Amino acid sequence: MSWSKLKQQLESFLSPALVGRVEYRATGYRYLPDKAGLCYISVDKKDVLRMNDKASQIRWYQSELEIKNDPDIQIPISPEEMEAVRKDTKGTVPEDRLKVIARNRKITGYAKELMSAQASLSKSNFVALANQFLSTSIEENIESKDILLNILALVDRRVGKKRILNMSEKMKLKHPAVQYFYELRRSTC
């Protein structure tokens, strides 16, 4: 499918409140047809998400340690996770230390997921993922671990106000790019 047709289809699914605010853009090189251009998403005429661009408004993580030390990331710990740590340590660790161990375990897993999602986004072919988005259900796109599919689903008109408001807890564990578009969509509800 040509870029103009794909762009038209993607923009036809935009939430009415975001029409004119969110745009999908691509650059192409006339004399290098085999070289892919840049694809990016802009909000209010500002480039917000450009694949693997360090100058982007959205935070890109370089290492697991950066994610662990970021005070903005808040990971909720369930009683089941605390109990699992208690079992692993055979009950010899003080209660306050259990919470720290459980949080560190969970944030390590989260960091690995975030880094792999970010790496796949920087290597991704926007056109291929956009076609995948158009051919799968909105539920699958929201639940996907792929950052771009999440973003496309969040700005989609098929996701209603009630669903947007109910997914605030899930969004805390998503990449900052997904969180940015979630807040954008939530502000229009």
Image (cartoon, rainbow, N blue to C red):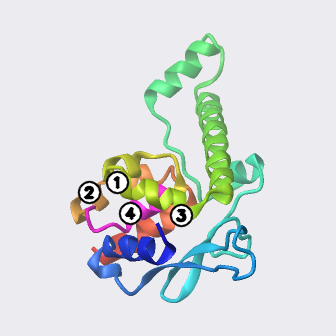
Helix, strand or loop at mark 3:
helix
Describe the element under mark 1 as helix, strand or loop. loop
Horizontally, is 47 left or right of 8 in the view?
A: right
Q: Which residue is mark 3?
A: 127
Q: Earlier in the sequence, mark 4 or mark 2?
A: 4
Mark 4 sits on what residue?
154
Q: Which mark lies nearer to you, 4 or 1?
A: 4
Q: Amino acid at mark 4?
A: Leu
Could you tell me residue 88's position as x and y percent? 62, 14
C-alpha separation, residue under disc 1 versus residue under disc 3: 27 Å
C-beta proximity under 8 Å, tags 1 and 3: no
Q: Nearer the viewer, mark 1 or mark 3?
A: 3
Q: Earlier in the sequence, mark 1 or mark 3?
A: 3
Q: Which residue is mark 1?
A: 167
- Amino acid type, residue under disc 1 in the picture: Met
Region in magenta? 149-159
Q: Which of the two labelled residues, at mark 4 and mark 1, occupies the earlier sequence position?
A: 4
